[in-house]
Amino acid sequence: MSEFNEFDQQGSVPERNTSSIISHAFEMYKGVFLYGLVIMIIFFIGDFVIQSITGYNSWSGFRNFRDFDGDYSDFVSWNRPGVSSYYSGYSFLGILMSPLYVGLIYITNKFNTKEQIDFSDLFIGYRQNLGNILLYSLITTIILWISFAMCFIPVIFVYPLFFLGYPILLFENATAMDALSKTYNLVKENYSVFLGTAILGGLISLSGIVLCCVGIVFTACFMEVAMYSAYCAYLGRPRQITNK
């Protein structure tokens, strides 16, 4: 069982603009990226299992990238055997792992407030508010896949609307619907800042791909830390959670 500590905690809070939020997130990420690495290792193990079951190799397209000769229309082929089963499993894996992303946000807050971090903190999302975290992840996954099906570009503009959902679920112990409502209402009033933060955060998260793709394990979880920084900027530094 857990509750919020009512006493003020030390820790930094960024200003309400994209550059300050990203800078704050970068400083936080330098202290917690090893936990993000653990998450990505778990993810790739799960992804390998899904590929083995479905017979679909999601990385084969990268090996043939140089052979496209400027025509990348076949980079992702939706007609390859096992593709639908793979992406269904991939989405399911992402939903199951969403409590780990929440755990990284929790660890980031502990790092920011100079609290002692335990490895078990990474799994707090499986101990607290689990049902709402999974439901929120399911709803947002469905919405984002629908947006992706609309020529991908709508995802860029829809994703920021869910940017504060995970921190709200964690620090406010909110229901999935309350988290959706609160993040939507707050983001739409400050949309340009959250759009810029989501785009820059996404580019940083994907930047590891340039290092022979393997480098993404070191950068992919930057987005969750950016979510924490944005939460601090607009809703204040959260009170620390104490486990009982």
Image (tube, helix red, strand yellow):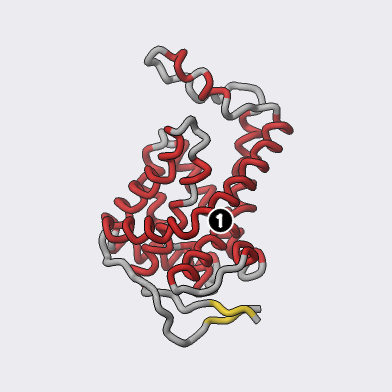
- Residue in the image at 47% along x and 36% along y: 149
Name the spot of residue 199 as percent of width and height, x first: 34, 47
- Quarter of the image with the N terminus in it: bottom right
Name the spot of residue 8 as percent of width and height, x first: 42, 84
Crowding at dot 1, Cα within 10 Å, few <14 / some 14-19 / many 20+, comes out as: many
Residue at which label 1 appears: 35
Task: Classify 233 as above or below 216.
Answer: below
92 on left or right of 147 = right
Name the spot of residue 161 as percent of width and height, x first: 39, 56
The one nearer the camera, 189 or 16, is: 16
> How many numbered circles does the render carry?
1
77 on left or right of 16 = right
- Residue in the image at 52% along x and 65% along y: 107
Q: Secondary structure at mark 1?
A: helix
117 on left or right of 126 = left
Residue 49 in sight in this render? yes
Type of the residue with mark 1:
Tyr
- Quarter of the image with the C terminus in it: bottom right
- Residue in the image at 61% along x and 68% along y: 118
Toward the right, the furthest residue is 53
Name the spot of residue 219 as percent of width and height, x first: 46, 46
Task: Classify 25 as above or below 182.
Answer: above
Residue 131 in sight in this render? no
Toward the bottom, the furthest residue is 7
The one nearer the camera, 119 or 87, is: 119
- Residue in the image at 42% along x and 36% along y: 150
The one nearer the camera, 161 or 111, is: 111
